[in-house]
């Protein structure tokens, strides 16, 4: 049975209790690195593309460990580089697929984004998987949960609007809070039994 959204939010607040400092520092480190590298002459967009995958895996791992009760330092977001190739491939592949669906219509693009949203959490716990397998497993895991995650995103959007009234300072709280909610969301949905195959026998991608 799905946890009500309000309870999921409350559980995430408890997960962050006493851990706001490391959570904010990890988030700032991730944002500074992924955004800042794009301004470096000669590296720019290519550099950003190269590091965003591993850092996305690292930040997912940091918050997943946190909600599981395993404290990690903010620098643990660099752990994603230990699985550099797969993390990079997962980021590029999911981004391309989402973009392709969004070019057709915005709604399929949103659905694709929701479907692939658990990819880096899956890779965090199952680093032996290929990028395609992790994406397909995310797709299977999100069956029956996409609308719930979409509603969560609407809640986050409302919170983001309120943060604008704080001249952006509120995002220092909101960003790690969202990451914690997403980690708890993954914790909930990962244990559910799948009623269909995670991926086909040849390991090819089912688009959405």
Image: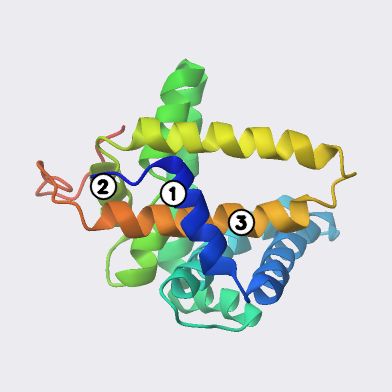
* Left or right position of 158 against 105: right
Categorize mark 1 by other alpha carbons within 10 Å: few (<14), some (14-19), many (20+): few
Inspect this view and state whether residue 97 appears: no
Which residue appears at 11% of the width and 45% of the height? Answer: 197
Q: Give the spatial CA distance, label 3 vs label 2.
A: 22 Å
Q: Are marks 2 and 1 in contact (CB under 8 Å)?
A: no
Find residue 177 and name its label: 3
Q: Earlier in the sequence, mark 3 or mark 2?
A: 2
Q: Earlier in the sequence, mark 1 or mark 3?
A: 1
Q: Earlier in the sequence, mark 2 or mark 1?
A: 1
Looking at the picture, tell me which residue is in the foreground, 152 or 17: 17
| Residue 31 found in image quarter | bottom right
Inspect this view and state whether residue 163 appears: yes
Find residue 7 and name its label: 1
Q: Which residue, as the protein is rendered here, is positioned at the far right?
A: 167
Residue 81 vertical position relative to residue 14 in the rendered view, above or below: below
Residue 97 vertical position relative to residue 91 in the rendered view, above or below: above
Looking at the picture, tell me which residue is in the foreground, 194 or 201: 194
- Residue 135 position, x and y percent, is 33, 49
Residue 15 vertical position relative to residue 198 in the rendered view, above or below: below
> Could you say whether the residue bearing mark 2 is in a helix, strand or loop?
helix
- Residue 67 position, x and y percent, is 46, 69
> Could you say whether the residue bearing mark 1 is in a helix, strand or loop?
helix
Which residue appears at 47% of the width and 58% of the height? Answer: 11
Position of the C terminus, as image quadrant, is top left
Looking at the picture, tell me which residue is in the foreground, 44 or 79: 79
Q: Nearer the observer, disc 2 or disc 1?
A: 1
Find residue 141 and name its label: 2
> Could you say whether the residue bearing mark 3 is in a helix, strand or loop?
helix
* Left or right position of 48 against 199: right
| Residue 205 found in image quarter | top left
């Amino acid at each position: 049975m799905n946890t009500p959204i309000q309870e999921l939010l409350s559980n995430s607040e408890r997960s962050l209790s006493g851990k706001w400092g490391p959570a904010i520092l990890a988030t700032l480190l991730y944002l500074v690195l992924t955004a800042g590298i794009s301004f470096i002459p000669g590296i720019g967009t290519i550099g950003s593309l190269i590091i965003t995958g591993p850092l996305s895996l690292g930040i997912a791992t940091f918050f997943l460990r946190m909600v599981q009760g395993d404290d990690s330092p903010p620098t643990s977001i660099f752990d994603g580089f230990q699985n550099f190739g797969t993390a990079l491939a997962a980021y590029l592949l999911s981004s391309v697929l989402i973009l392709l669906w969004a070019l057709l219509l915005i709604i399929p693009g949103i659905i694709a984004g929701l479907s692939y949203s658990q990819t880096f959490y899956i890779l965090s716990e199952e680093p032996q998987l290929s990028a395609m397998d992790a994406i397909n497993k995310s797709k299977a895991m999100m069956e029956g949960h996409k609308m719930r995650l979409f509603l969560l995103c609407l809640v986050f959007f409302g919170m983001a609007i309120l943060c604008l009234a704080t001249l952006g300072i509120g995002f220092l709280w909101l960003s790690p809070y969202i990451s914690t909610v997403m980690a708890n969301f993954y914790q909930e949905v990962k244990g559910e039994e799948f009623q269909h195959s995670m991926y086909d026998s040849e390991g090819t991608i089912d688009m959405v």
